Amino acid sequence: MSAFEKNKSFDFLKQNAIYFVLLILLFVIIAQDPSFLNLMNFSNILTQSSVRLIIALGVAGLIVTQGTDLSAGRQVGLAAVVAATMLQAVDNVNRVFPEMGQVPIPVVILAVCAIGALIGLFNGLVVAYLNVTPFIATMGTMIIVYGANSLYYDSVGGSPIAGFSQEFSDFAQGFFRFGSFKLSYITIYAAIATLFMWVLWTKTRFGKNVFAIGGNPEAAKVSGVNVAKNLALVYMLSGAFYAFAGMLEAGRIGSATNNLGFMYEMDAIAACVVGGVSFAGGVGSIIGVVTGVLIFTVINYGLSYIGVNPYWQYIIKGSIIILAVAIDSLKYAKKK
């Protein structure tokens, strides 16, 4: 084998190393329990991936701009609690607001997404106009949002909010059945969100501006891109995605507390990195985000399926994240 071929092979391995590692893990899971390969598990994986994918789609745009969002999980929790208090069944004896009539689901979606967008806009303004690093800005917002959510949660009883209307339960837990395979409504919502972001990233000037900012903010500014405005819009859009995901998560699990969403942002960020969205900025794709989320869900679900100790699961996931970032750094160093 020539030096050129060796170098080409090494580059291929480096570009796809994380997928080889995860493929090996998948083979181990299947070897331990071949029954893992069935349509019911595939359906469950898609359903469990869906809410995480919507969150990851929000985070991905921030990573492309060399940012991040540590408040994503807490925003999910706030949206879940607010939506849950508005969507309880009218005949629920433990209804938080018994005098409130049945609120239409579209109204709740608009309300929670507006709240999420406002929080995201706040993050964006702090990052874009006050020049606070995204890590610090969103860490502060994470604490603020959790405090505000906890105050609201305590004010409405401080116990899990459940007993949703049948319409909302159907909206979040319903599915289409195709023989032994079930396609959940949540999976369809995630697919619509994915298509929306794909169009935004690849077919609009806004998407091109986001990648230009991530690649080189100064060059983007010189080219006429309003960097601050676009950053604020990216964070605003992300907040709306977190909120919608929070509402769906409350419906999916059937209840909401102020602790729902804890550490969800870490899974979303990890999935984006594994899917090739670079912290170096300006690099990423929607298909990569989808792939990253599916990979992590398969690993989580698969390791639990074969009975791996949860503590070992943390070690494995953490190792995968470090490996993915290390590989990304090598790619970026070579480009530089």
Image (spheres, rainbow, N blue to C red):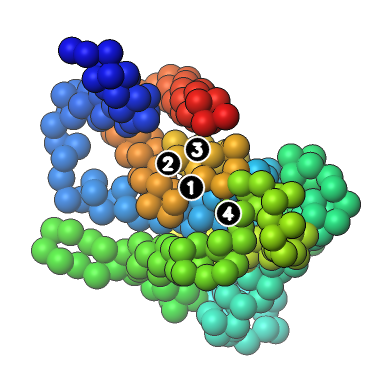
Q: Where is residue 53 in the image (x, y as percent from the top left)?
A: 45, 53
Residue 271 versus residue 212 in the image, above or below: above
Residue 273 versus residue 131 in the image, above or below: above
Disc 2 + disc 3, Cβ < 8 Å: yes
- The mark found on residue 284 in the picture is 1
Q: Is mark 2 on a helix, strand or loop?
A: loop
Callout 2 amino acid: Gly
The residues tagged by marks 1 and 4 sit, at their Cα atoms, a distance apart of 9 Å
Please name whichever residue, 207 or 238, is drawn nearer the observer in this view of the structure: 207
- The mark found on residue 211 in the picture is 4
The residues tagged by marks 2 and 1 sit, at their Cα atoms, a distance apart of 8 Å
The residues tagged by marks 2 and 3 sit, at their Cα atoms, a distance apart of 5 Å
Q: Quadrant of the N terminus?
A: top left
Disc 2 + disc 1, Cβ < 8 Å: yes
Residue for point 57% across, 29% down: 336
- The mark found on residue 275 in the picture is 2
Callout 3 amino acid: Val
The residues tagged by marks 2 and 4 sit, at their Cα atoms, a distance apart of 16 Å
Residue 144 versus residue 109 in the image, above or below: above
N-terminal of the two: label 2 or label 1?
2
N-terminal of the two: label 2 or label 4?
4
Tell me: 3 left or right of 319. Answer: left
Report the residue marked by disc 3: 273
Callout 1 amino acid: Gly
N-terminal of the two: label 1 or label 3?
3
Q: Can residue 159 be seen in this view?
A: no
Q: Position of residue 201 (x, y in %)?
A: 50, 62
* Quadrant housing residue 299: top left
N-terminal of the two: label 3 or label 4?
4
Please name whichever residue, 204 or 189, is drawn nearer the observer in this view of the structure: 204
Residue sitting farthest toward the right = 130
Q: How crowded is mark 2: few (under 14 residues within 10 Å), some or many (20 or more)?
A: many
